[in-house]
Amino acid sequence: MSIADLFNYFSYVSGLFLSLTIIVLLLVWLERKVLARIQMRMGPMRVGFHGALQPIADAIKLISKEDILPAWADKLVYWFAPIVVFVPAFLLWVTIPFGKNMVIRSLDLGLFFIVAISVLSVLGLIMAGWGSANKYAVLGGLRAAGQLMSYEIPLIMAILTIAILSQSLNLVEIVDKQSQIPNIFIQPLGLVLFFIAGLAELGRTPFDIHHAESEVVGGPFVEYSGAHWSVFFLAEYINTFTISILTVLLFLGGWHWPNIPFSGNLQTILSVFVVLIKTILVVSVIFWIRATYPRLRIDQLMSFGWKMLIPMAFINVTITACIIYYDELPLWILPILSVILLILSAVIIQRKFSKNIINTVQVISAKSLLKEKSEVDIN
């Protein structure tokens, strides 16, 4: 490899890192504004125009804070854990296109690469908990491992249905296959599975189990501070943007829909604009969910994953594979079956939720009656 090639790769990596850092700062500002709007607040307003410079001020504060290392921690594991979490989140962008002709390397096995690299971040969370030598951090790391490994199954199965439907693992080809009909109209169940499993993989509300402040004090990062804690924070927001843009590319038509009637550089610029607009909408939905739903318990989280999402994911893959294999079956059967399965799932969840509420009310009522009876007996 020549010096010129090394310089080009360094330029690509530096440009990608700078772009993702800017995107993370924008997402932090956007999340605060969206949450403030939903909660009837103003959000950050003082630093910059409508608080636009507040994320930069927060970044400076984190970098300048003292980086504390617990005396009893395993130093090598402790320092290496943030890197193991961040590097996979960064490497995914090697093959994810920002728009038409805007990708560092269009891999034929792009989806396989994304799945293979994304699972490595679980190791970093376990290392963070173990290296901190803190019982709450270890507990958070183990909860993270259980959660992420469970929800990787429906996430991968949802990706597999798109690969079966498109007959390709290349993201650019998958987007081009949606030039007429986006996959959301063919695979609505796949979109729901991918989006919910993606939220769980991010660890965002209502799936923020492993770093639940009210339960495990802060998860596997509880002993981290300053710049090292900010690396976990940076990786989380990069992954949020990654899940959002993958939702756009796999299900919402990418830079298609509407079709761009231009060519050349103008087409490339407009395609990036279309992808970013769709991605911002998906990100806003993620922030909206955070402001709306409470956190699940760990038993509810695992039960929902193993009893609902994983069976639905396998059923979805089986139906998709059968319809694609048997050419005489029309493709419009797939969205109809997907909608039926979604409705059945919603009914099952609603009934189970209502039953749990009724049981809880009955237990509380029984305890209240026993307490009143004991008070009467004492008197």
Image (tube, helix red, strand yellow):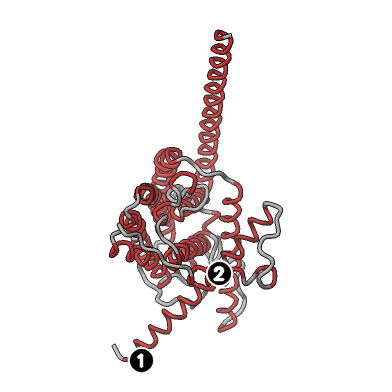
In the image: residue 374, left or right of residue 146: right
Q: Residue at x 69, y 72 (%)?
A: 49
Q: Look at the image and tell me in which quarter the N terminus lies.
A: bottom left
Q: Look at the image and tell me in which quarter the C terminus lies.
A: top right
Q: Where does label 2 land, which residue?
A: 25
Quarter of the view holding residue 156 = bottom left
Give the SS element for disc 2: helix
Residue 112 appears in the figure: no
Q: Is residue 170 above or below residue 153?
A: below
Given the image, on which type of amino acid does mark 1 rest?
Ala
* Label whose residue precedes the other's in the sequence (1 or 2): 1
> Closest to the observer: 112 or 68?
68
Given the image, on which type of amino acid does mark 2 rest?
Leu
Q: Residue at x 39, y 54 (%)?
A: 220
- The residue carrying pointer 1 sits among few (fewer than 14), some (14 to 19) or many (20 or more) residues within 10 Å by Cα, namely few
Give the SS element for disc 1: helix
Any mark on residue 305, and which? none
> Closest to the observer: 132 or 369?
132
Q: Where does label 1 land, which residue?
A: 4
Q: Position of residue 343 (x, y in %)?
A: 55, 39
Q: Residue at x 55, y 34 (%)?
A: 350
Q: Position of residue 172 (x, y in %)?
A: 45, 70
Can you tell which of label 1 and label 2 is closer to the viewer?
Answer: 2
- Is the Cβ of the residue at disc 1 closer than 8 Å to that at disc 2? no
Q: Position of residue 205 (x, y in %)?
A: 52, 50
Q: Position of residue 359 (x, y in %)?
A: 52, 24
Question: Distance from label 1 to label 2 (Cα)?
Answer: 32 Å
